[in-house]
Image: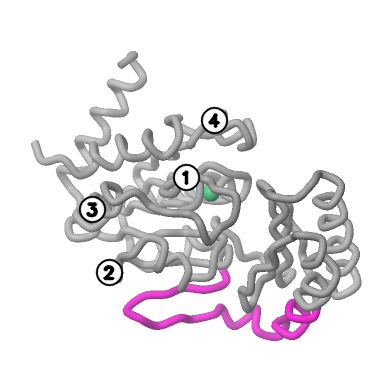
Amino acid sequence: MDGDERNHARRLAAWRDDPGSSAILTDIDGTLAPIVPTPDMAEVPAELKKLLRRLSEAYLLVAGISGRKTEDARKLVGLEDIVYFGNHGFEILRDGEIEVITEALPYLEKVQELEQRARDELGPLGAFVEEKGITASIHYRNVPKEIGERCVELVNAEGERLGLRITVGRGVVEARPPIRADKGTAVRRLVEEYGPRRATFLGDDTTDLDAFRELEKLREEGVLEEILRVGVASEEGPPEIETEADLTVDGVEGVGEVLRMLAEEN
Ligand SMILES: [Mg+2]
């Protein structure tokens, strides 16, 4: 442990002394579940599930914030009693109920049109078109590079035609309504609603940077007293996930260490 790590360990100890004022917000794929070739193969290790259950009993809020549909996020994590903010901030699931943010609803048909086109043209080439409702995800991790490029091209062109917003992540291109809804707006909504004094966010990819940046804004505004941005390092992740983090950990195992520090009793 170097000086920085000891400092973080001390800070995390303060969090677990006052869990009722602290929120644990986390990405799921690549953070709680190791990255695998197709999203349906992803799994959260049993030990992490156990830790998250313990944390959800003690802390003010434990929420999984994911690009996935909220129902998929819940199935993957396997816990009923945490909050899931899914579809990049468009959908929230808690107490068994799903809510789509109302500003997004007028775009539902356009997203479905793009999804159908991807299914017809990119599906036969080997891309995996994930059914997601208010957003569309086309996965190309497991196809040759030129087909991946074709996926990005087609989704970009269709997105422009239909007036949708397109983003590219690790082996996936996504279409969504052109309104601001991302992991940052999800973090803000949860913080404003639950009112923690401290909040942490753990993430590994480009879309997680929105959450990091919103946490920083919330601290600047005085809404949060303390934040902790935990970056999960990987070969495919963007460099900012380390440069903008307060603490960088190595893969899902490193996330386990942070969660254990948040959970351990003195
Ligand atoms: Mg991720």
Q: CA distance from mark 2 to mark 1?
A: 22 Å
Residue 259 x %, y %: 29, 42
* Stretch in magenta: 90-113
Query: Please, what secondary structure does the residue beneath circle 4 have?
Result: helix
Q: Which element carries disc 3, helix, strand or loop?
A: helix
SS label for mark 2: loop
Q: Position of residue 215 (x, y in %)?
A: 47, 48
Name the amino acid type tagged 2.
Answer: Asp
Judge whether 29 appears above or below 233 on screen.
Answer: below
Tell whether 115 sits left or right of 262: right
Amino acid marked by disc 3: Lys
Q: CA distance from mark 3 to mark 1?
A: 17 Å
Q: Which residue is mark 3?
A: 50
Above or below: residue 44 compared with residue 4: below
> Disc 2 vs disc 3: Cβ atoms closer than 8 Å?
no
Distance, label 4 to label 1, CA atoms, is: 18 Å
- Does 17 sit left or right of 110 as displayed? left
Q: Position of residue 227 (x, y in %)?
A: 39, 42
Q: Which residue is mark 4?
A: 242
> In which quarter of the view is residue 156 placed?
bottom right
Marks 3 and 1 in Cβ contact (< 8 Å): no
Return the mark for residue 81. Answer: 2
Q: In the rendered structure, are the residues bearing label 2 and label 1 in contact, judged by CB atoms less than 8 Å apart?
A: no
Query: Sequence order check: which comes first, mark 2 or mark 1?
Result: 1
Identified by mark 1, the residue type is: Pro
Q: CA distance from mark 3 to mark 4?
A: 27 Å
